[in-house]
Amino acid sequence: QVQLVESGGGLVQAGGSLRLSCAASGRTFSIMGWFRQAPGKEREFVATIKSSGGSTLYKDSVKGRFTIFGDNAKNTVYLQMNSLNAEDTAVYFCAARLTGTIGASTTTRNYDYWGQGTQVTVSS
């Protein structure tokens, strides 16, 4: 049974940092990604990483602040979030693709599995 389990969310002050983790079980994946959904908004792409080679892509507004990285031995992907601001407040979801290209991994419909989400709240 495939599972993606996120952890690491919480409440942080503006300018602070959080690290999200997503532990995958059941199989390995070609591409892992992070998305987020704020109240009343659609789920949006944040970052993605290809397991083989480590290629990454980021949403423009998080470039330079967020870093996605993985530990293939642990089948886990992380999202290090620095310099957080109120606009980063959302439920963050981990997602996984069995196959595909990094360039086509910024849309929700291309992902095969999803985690349950973890809340990130940034207070200003």
Image (cartoon, grey):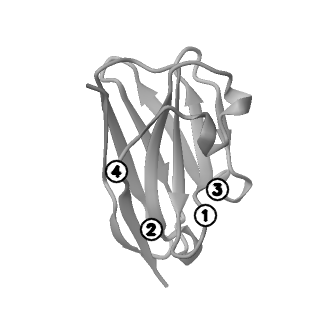
Secondary structure found at label 3: helix
Secondary structure found at label 1: loop
**Residue at label 3?**
62
**Residue at label 2?**
16
Camera-near label (2 vs 4) is 4
Q: Amino acid at mark 1?
A: Glu
The reply to whether callout 3 and callout 1 are in contact (CB within 8 Å) is: no
The reply to whether callout 1 and callout 4 are in contact (CB within 8 Å) is: no
Q: Could you say where residue 25 lies in the image, as x and y percent from the top left?
A: 28, 26
- Compared to residue 122, the image places residue 35 above or below, namely above
Camera-near label (3 vs 4) is 4
Q: Amino acid at mark 3?
A: Val
Q: Could you say where residue 10 lies in the image, as x and y percent from the top left?
A: 32, 66
Mark closer to the chain start, 3 or 4: 3
Mark closer to the chain start, 2 or 4: 2
| Residue at x-position 53% and y-position 38% | 33
| Residue at x-position 34% and y-position 60% | 9
Q: CA distance from mark 3 to mark 4?
A: 22 Å
Q: CA distance from mark 1 to mark 4?
A: 16 Å
- Compared to residue 47, the image places residue 51 above or below, namely above
Mark closer to the chain start, 1 or 4: 1
Q: Nearer the viewer, residue 81 or 87?
A: 87
- Compared to residue 105, the image places residue 17 above or below, namely below
Mark closer to the chain start, 2 or 3: 2
Q: Which mark is residue 42?
A: 1
Q: Amino acid at mark 2?
A: Gly
In which quadrant of the rendered image does the N terminus lie? top left
Q: CA distance from mark 2 to mark 4?
A: 24 Å
**Residue at label 4?**
116
Q: Could you say where residue 41 lies in the image, as x and y percent from the top left?
A: 60, 70
